[in-house]
């Protein structure tokens, strides 16, 4: 596991969205945008249904995620974080995690998910293997 | 090839950044953020050095790219576009394409790349196979 610098942790805990890449059965990439946070030293995101990314990760844990910042590099390009990691799925707790993340992504006091009786769902837990991109976290 | 709706074309031609996924030799995903535009019906982006994504695409043309919008869905989630496509690399013309895209991404009158004698470079040309995400372009 790679230790993440404070700057990368702060971005992951901000309201910036993460583009999460998983691998389909035929090896092609699958992408969706998710809310992310930290739990211990893992990056976490939550899914109510057993969707394609959950099934993909159960079969192949190799994932990548990328997050844009509002900062510009010295030649005027937007800084961004890329995390390469190994993911695993745990069952349950999705609604609670989504609600915690909604306080950051939608705003304090948000009630999310907007449904009376959400299913237990799934949590993706990503161990960070390597950090890349453009910004203070990149070499 | 899939016909792209006007809303998707407009987003690709805007100043929104694209998160481009290619596949490494071992099948793992590789991500970087790029400027994109349209040429005929292909999505194009430019690279001055023969970097990893150029080498990856030469070996395996399966790519994905995702772009955030500023619009929210009815349950308050950010709308975004995902394009799955087949990419190929052509040589030359990178600086000219980067300069054209810089007019959108940095601003009218921008002089990019900021170097006196840029190499011919490479252009990635992506044929769109499938569109996904959350927004007017998605089912």
Image (cartoon, coloured by chain):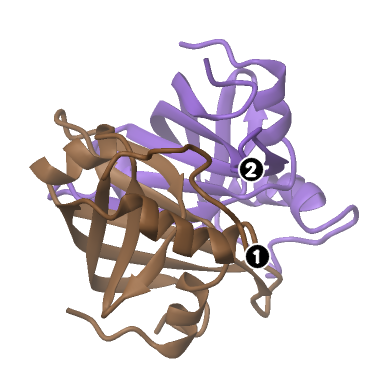
Chain colours: A brown, B purple
Considering only vertical position in the picture, is A122 above or below A5? Answer: above
In the picture of the structure, the residue carrying the numbered disc 1 is B117
In the picture of the structure, the residue carrying the numbered disc 2 is B76
Left/right of residue B124 with respect to residue A123 in the rendered view: right
Q: Residue furthest front?
A: A116
Considering only vertical position in the picture, is B105 above or below A2? Answer: above
Q: Secondary structure at mark 2?
A: loop
Q: Is residue B92 visible?
A: no
Q: Position of residue B57 (x, y in %)?
A: 33, 40
CA neighbours of label 2 inside 10 A, class few (<14), some (14 to 19), many (20+): few
Q: Position of residue A102 (x, y in %)?
A: 53, 58
Considering only vertical position in the picture, is A3 above or below A34? Answer: below
Q: Nearer the viewer, residue A55 or A98?
A: A98
Q: Secondary structure at mark 1?
A: loop
Seen at 50% across and 85% down, the residue is A136
- What's the CA distance linking mark 1 and mark 2? 47 Å
Q: Position of residue B22 (x, y in %)?
A: 33, 44
Considering only vertical position in the picture, is A16 above or below A11? Answer: above
Seen at 30% across and 39% down, the residue is A119
User: The numbered mark 1 sits on a residue in which chain?
Assistant: B
Do callouts 1 and 2 mark residues in contact (Cβ within 8 Å)?
Answer: no
Precedes in sequence: disc 1 or disc 2: 2
CA neighbours of label 1 inside 10 A, class few (<14), some (14 to 19), many (20+): few
Q: Is residue A23 visible?
A: yes
């Amino acid at each position: 596991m790679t230790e993440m610098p404070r700057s990368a942790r702060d971005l992951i805990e901000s309201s910036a969205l993460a583009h999460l890449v998983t691998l389909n059965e035929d090896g092609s990439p699958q992408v969706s945008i998710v809310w992310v946070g930290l739990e211990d030293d893992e990056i976490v995101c939550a899914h109510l249904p057993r969707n394609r990314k959950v099934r993909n990760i159960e079969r192949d844990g190799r994932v990548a995620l990328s997050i844009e910042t509002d900062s510009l590099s010295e030649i005027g390009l937007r800084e961004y974080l890329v995390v390469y990691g190994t993911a695993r799925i745990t069952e349950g707790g999705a609604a609670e995690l989504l609600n915690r993340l909604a306080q950051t992504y939608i705003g304090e006091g948000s009630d999310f998910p907007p449904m009376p009786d959400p299913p237990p769902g799934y949590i993706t837990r990503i161990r960070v293997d390597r950090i890349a991109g453009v910004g203070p976290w990149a070499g």
